[in-house]
Image (tube, rainbow, N blue to C red):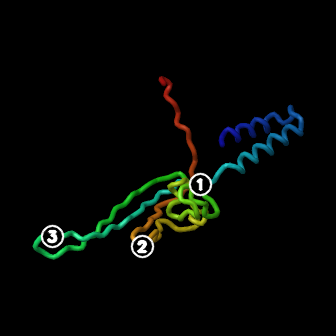
């Protein structure tokens, strides 16, 4: 994205030296490139699953047990307008599966975080934060 901005600045600096048609064409193409960039966000969320089971105790009553397990992830996702088809199972993708495929609904940008969403009967999703993603390239060491 920064390289497009550099091209626009060079064209602006030298537009007197270039034919008007070329200047207009280059600026229009740069704008098209900007418009085609996906809206990327950094999503931090936790999925909490529950698991219930019966612990069979010899010579005593059975005990009902439940356990919670959680996974916290920070993912880079694209904000899209509608549910896509699931790439593996077909049919519409579930909202809670979208971040694992690099997507989220644009409507998530309007919610206040943290937000708890019931995913299924036995699990919840906690959305901690959604912030715009700014790609930054790491500087390489001079030794490498």
- First of labels 1, 2 by sequence position: 1
- First of labels 3, 2 by sequence position: 3
Q: Secondary structure at mark 2?
A: loop
Q: Which residue is mark 1?
A: 78
Q: Note whether residue 72 is visible.
A: yes
In the rendered image, residue 3, in percent from the top left (x then y), is placed at: 68, 38
Q: Determine which quarter of the picture holds residue 131.
A: bottom right
Q: Which residue is mark 2?
A: 121
Q: Secondary structure at mark 1?
A: strand
For disc 2, the neighbor class at 10 Å (few under 14, some 14 to 19, many from 20) is few
Q: Is residue 10 above or below residue 46?
A: above
Q: Secondary structure at mark 3?
A: loop
For disc 1, the neighbor class at 10 Å (few under 14, some 14 to 19, many from 20) is many
Q: Nearer the viewer, residue 76 or 68?
A: 68
Q: Nearer the viewer, mark 3 or mark 2?
A: 3
Q: Nearer the viewer, residue 88 or 34?
A: 88
In the rendered image, residue 118, in percent from the top left (x then y), is placed at: 45, 71
Q: Quadrant of the N terminus?
A: top right
Q: Is residue 135 above or below residue 72?
A: above
For disc 3, the neighbor class at 10 Å (few under 14, some 14 to 19, many from 20) is few
Q: Which residue is mark 3?
A: 57
Q: Residue at x 58, y 48 (%)?
A: 134
């Amino acid at each position: 994205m920064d390289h497009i901005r550099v091209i626009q600045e060079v064209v602006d600096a030298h537009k007197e030296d270039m034919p008007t048609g070329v200047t207009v064409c280059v600026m229009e193409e740069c704008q098209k490139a900007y418009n085609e960039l996906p809206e990327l966000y950094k999503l931090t969320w936790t999925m909490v699953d529950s698991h219930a089971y019966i612990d069979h105790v010899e010579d005593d009553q059975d005990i009902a047990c439940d356990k919670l397990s959680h996974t916290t992830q920070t993912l880079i996702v694209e904000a899209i307008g509608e549910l896509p088809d699931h790439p593996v199972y077909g049919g519409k993708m579930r909202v809670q599966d979208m971040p694992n495929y690099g997507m989220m609904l644009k409507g998530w940008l309007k919610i206040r975080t943290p937000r708890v969403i019931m995913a299924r009967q036995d699990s919840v999703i906690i959305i901690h934060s959604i912030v715009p993603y700014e790609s930054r390239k790491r500087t390489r060491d001079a030794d490498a």
